[in-house]
Image (spheres, helix red, strand yellow):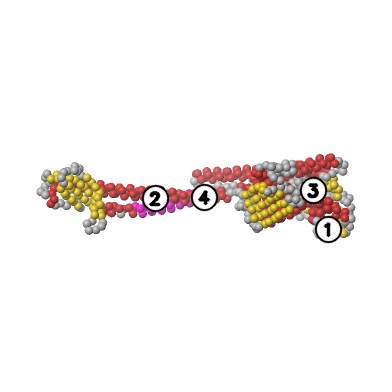
Amino acid sequence: MKLVSKNIIINTIVSVIILFLGEYSIYSFIRSKIQNETREHLLADCVDFIRMSQKQENIMEFKHNIGDIIRIQPIAKIEHTAPVFQTVQEEEEWEDESFTTEMVVFDVNHHGKFYRVSIQYTIDEIQDQADSILPIMLITGLGMLVMLVLVNVFVYYRLFSPVDKLIKYIEKFEIHDLKRIEPIPTTTHEFSILSAKVTKMSQNLIDDYKAMKEFTENMAHEVQTPLAVISTKIEQCLQDENLTENQAQLLSVAMKKVQKLVTLNQGLSLLSKLENHQYNKTYDINVAKLVQERISFFVDFLQNKNLKLAESYMSDMTVKMDSILAEVLIDNLIKNAIKHNVDNGTIHVTLQGNILTIANTGHAPKASVSDFFNRFYSEKSNESLGLGLSIVKKICDYYGYKINYNYENGLHSIHIEFLSSQPL
Amino acid sequence: MRINILIVEDERNLAEEVSSYLEHFQYQCRIAMTYADALEALSEKQYDIILLDLRLPDGHGTDLINHIKRKKFESGIIILSAIDELDMRVQALNAGADDYLVKPFHMSELNARLNALVRRNKFKGNNDIEFFEIKADTVKKIVLVNDKPLPLTQKEYELLMYFISNAGKVITKDAISFSVWSSHSDMDVSNEIIYTHIKNLRKKLLQAGCNDYIRSVYGVGYKFQA
């Protein structure tokens, strides 16, 4: 939820609560004020009645203009020594309606006889008058609420517009663009601190990233060049006419190890580039087409082991990937399926929906299944580097694809589910 | 006519190895170890081929390509770089380089690519290769032995071209694997595959009445020699 909406909701809830509490307390205040006033009046009437009635012979025929309603009845003995106040609903005599009255009840001793007198005042009218204030207050309150919301929105868009801008900049920030987050123009102290910090942090990130990228590239360069020298020197030695078989074998082993280092260096630099998110150009790649194309490069390898290839493409899906990574991904899967296959085995390639499965016949795995994607894991440690599948895993992680491996009925299967196609 | 090659490479060992390998094939090589050296060499005469390292101590290879293109030299340019990145490749090729070889490379590979480039640039229209009784048209990809066509598979043809380019030199299996099977060097089966293909190629050549030029060198590599 947006900050401005949150703010408005909280403000509205609090204001409405306060408004209604206010309304209620004013309502009860006026009510009790009316009651108190009326009761004071009743008490005065009470005194007047007693004073004036004493001059009369017969209290029942006493003429006066006290109260809206007055009832006098004889009683046996005095029960109320002090006047008792009550709020009473009176029934209209000829209608079904009732009205509210304030009543005082008191007992009097009139020339030796006891009477109970009750005086009542109708307070409905005066209450109605007082109540008519409430809607006015309510309207005022609601008007203020609307103003509050408007002010909030205005303040938000005015005061917080630099922050909004900053957020947009941060959202747009991609480390490999090498563009820092520019400071936003603002006169608010806190925002300018925030903005300056963000700019500085983005600059630091970019510097670190650049340094790391440079290091990776330099590393590859610095290692590749000596390797190139070694490799050419060995080739030069091999050209010698007087080379003995033993020397040739030694040189051959040295050459193989150099090649291994080269492959390792390339693999590691690929992995580190992946970790640094240095692949960000994407193309639409048709998975079925790509797989078929890559497989064609391995025909000789398939024939060599007399492997059967069972392909089934039931989907025409395209993914957004870097073209090199897509090739590396598929190549590594195929290589893996060939390398760990048995002679006269089979490779199943299936593309169904958005799931690519490459399965190959092979011996049961010795170690736990999760190790397959670990760097340098290799069952026959001398023959391969064990980087292949870890590169596959990294590429899948990079694009948010789901990958899993399982072994069932003599078949090693790797499933890749192409989900979103944005680098994570 | 000797072909002039300028090797721009700051690693002396590598430059000298390249130079000595290529001189074996009658190329004339000059080494420039810095950007400044290269400029000086280029001001003295035109080179047919320039082998160029992208990272030089005092400059960048692409600037040199631009310089060459500005001067309208008709030199072929092969980049020798330790940087195996698509961006760099595209950048260099766009600037006008003809080929891009990642270090470390096999001498035989460099030589084969050099030959192809020389054929393209220097002998316009004439793309024939001759090695005694073997003739090849590299455009139509046809091989004649004793003037009779010899049907070869794609891989056998590539193998033969690679051999002829590097005739007289020992070519390692790795180099063959890299060149003909586009670098699946981490595939442990490639030796057998190479063996099978070479065996087939040799059989076809012999059946066509060709001399046996392919020699195995202690199981390390092969040598194509008269």
Q: Chain of mark 4?
A: A
Which amino acid type corresponds to the residue marked 3 in the rendered image? Answer: Glu
Over which residues does the magenta segment extend? A136-164
The residue carrying mark 3 is: B192
Badge 2 vs badge 3, beta-carbon distance below 8 Å: no
Q: Secondary structure at mark 4?
A: helix
Which residue is denoted by mark 1 in the rendering? B151
Few, some or many residues within 10 Å of mark 1 (<14, 14–19, 20+): some
* Residue A240 vs residue B76, the one in the foreground: A240
Are the two marked residues, 4 and 2, in contact with CB atoms closer than 8 angstroms?
Answer: no
Label 2 – label 3 distance at C-alpha: 85 Å
- Looking at the picture, which amino acid does disc 2 mark? Val
Q: Quadrant of residue B11?
A: top right
Amino acid type, residue under disc 1 in the picture: Pro
Q: Nearer the viewer, mark 4 or mark 2?
A: 2
Question: How far apart are labels 4 and 2 at the CA level?
Answer: 29 Å
